[in-house]
C-alpha cells in the first residue's frame, strides 16, 4: 500500500473515531495534531504533498509525529515495497484490526444503543472475534434459528426486539 493511501485511510478511521461520520479533512487533521502535540505539527500543504504522492517519504520527525497521533507503529508509515502482498499478514494482525473496528463501533453507538455497545465490546474482547462473526453469518442464514436462539439464550426485551432488523422485516410483511 502506498503511503498516501495509508494516510487517507488513517484520516478516515480517525474521523470515525471522533464521531464525524466522515474522514477528517486535511485541515482538521493539521489542527488536531498541533493541539495534541503542543505546537508541533505539519502544514496542510505538506500533508497534501504526502497524500498526492508528490512526497513518497516522510522525515523521521514527521513519521514519529503522525505515528503518535494515529497510534500506529512508525514502521506502518512507509510505503510498502513493490510486490508486497498484504495477504501475508498474520491472522493476529487482522484480528487486532477487527477488534479495533468493533471497539470503534461500540464507541460510536454507545450513547444511542447501550445494548449494542455492550455486545460489540464483548465481541471485541473475545479471543477469536473473526470466528464469532463467521458463526453469526451462518446463524443468520437460518432466520428461524435466530428467533429460537434468542428465546433460549437471552430473551429479547420488547424495546430491543422493536429495534432489531428481523422484527422490522416481520412487521412489514
Image: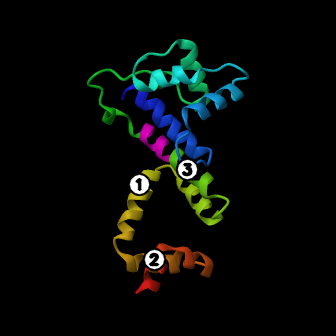
Q: Residues within 10 Å of mark 3 (few under 14, many from 20)?
A: few
Q: Which of the 4 image quadrants contains residue 39?
A: top right
Disc 3 and disc 1: Cα gap in Å?
Answer: 27 Å
Q: Secondary structure at mark 1?
A: helix
Residue at the far left in the pictured view: 83
- Is mark 3 in CB contact (under 8 Å) with mark 2? no
Q: Read off the magenta span.
A: 92-99
Q: Main secondary structure of the magenta part?
A: helix
Q: Residue at x 46, y 50 (%)?
A: 128
Position of residue 73 measured from the top left corner of the image (x, y, whole percent): 53, 26
Q: Nearer the viewer, mark 3 or mark 1?
A: 3
Marks 2 and 1, the one that precedes in the sequence: 1
Q: Secondary structure at mark 3?
A: loop
Where is mark 2, residue-wise?
166
Residue drawn at x 43%, y 17% as measured from the top left:
55
Q: Magenta span has 131?
A: no
Q: Nearer the viewer, residue 41 or 94?
A: 41
Relative horizontal placement of residue 32, taking residue 126 as reference (left or right)? right
* Residue that numbered label 1 is attached to: 131
Find disc 3 in the rendering and name its residue.
21
Instruction: From the top left corner, tell me how far across and down residue 85 is, in percent.
Output: 29, 30
Please tell me which of labels 3 and 2 falls first in the chain: 3
Amino acid at each position: 500500500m502506498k503511503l498516501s493511501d495509508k494516510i487517507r485511510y488513517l484520516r478516515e478511521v480517525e474521523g470515525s473515531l471522533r464521531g464525524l461520520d466522515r474522514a477528517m479533512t486535511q485541515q482538521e487533521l493539521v489542527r488536531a495534531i498541533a493541539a495534541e502535540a503542543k505546537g508541533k505539527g505539519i502544514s496542510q500543504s505538506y500533508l497534501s504533498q504526502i497524500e498526492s504522492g508528490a512526497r513518497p517519504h516522510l522525515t523521521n520527525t514527521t513519521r514519529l509525529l503522525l505515528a503518535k497521533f494515529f497510534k500506529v507503529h512508525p514502521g506502518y508509515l512507509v510505503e510498502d515495497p513493490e510486490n508486497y502482498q498484504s495477504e501475508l499478514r498474520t491472522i493476529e494482525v487482522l484480528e487486532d484490526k477487527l477488534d479495533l473496528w468493533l471497539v470503534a463501533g461500540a464507541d460510536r453507538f454507545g450513547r444511542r444503543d447501550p445494548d449494542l455497545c455492550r455486545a460489540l465490546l464483548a465481541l471485541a474482547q473475545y479471543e477469536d472475534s473473526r470466528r464469532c462473526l463467521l458463526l453469526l453469518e451462518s446463524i443468520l442464514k437460518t432466520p428461524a434459528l435466530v428467533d429460537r436462539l434468542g428465546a433460549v439464550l437471552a430473551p429479547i426485551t420488547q424495546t430491543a426486539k422493536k429495534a432489531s432488523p428481523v422484527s422490522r422485516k416481520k412487521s412489514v410483511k
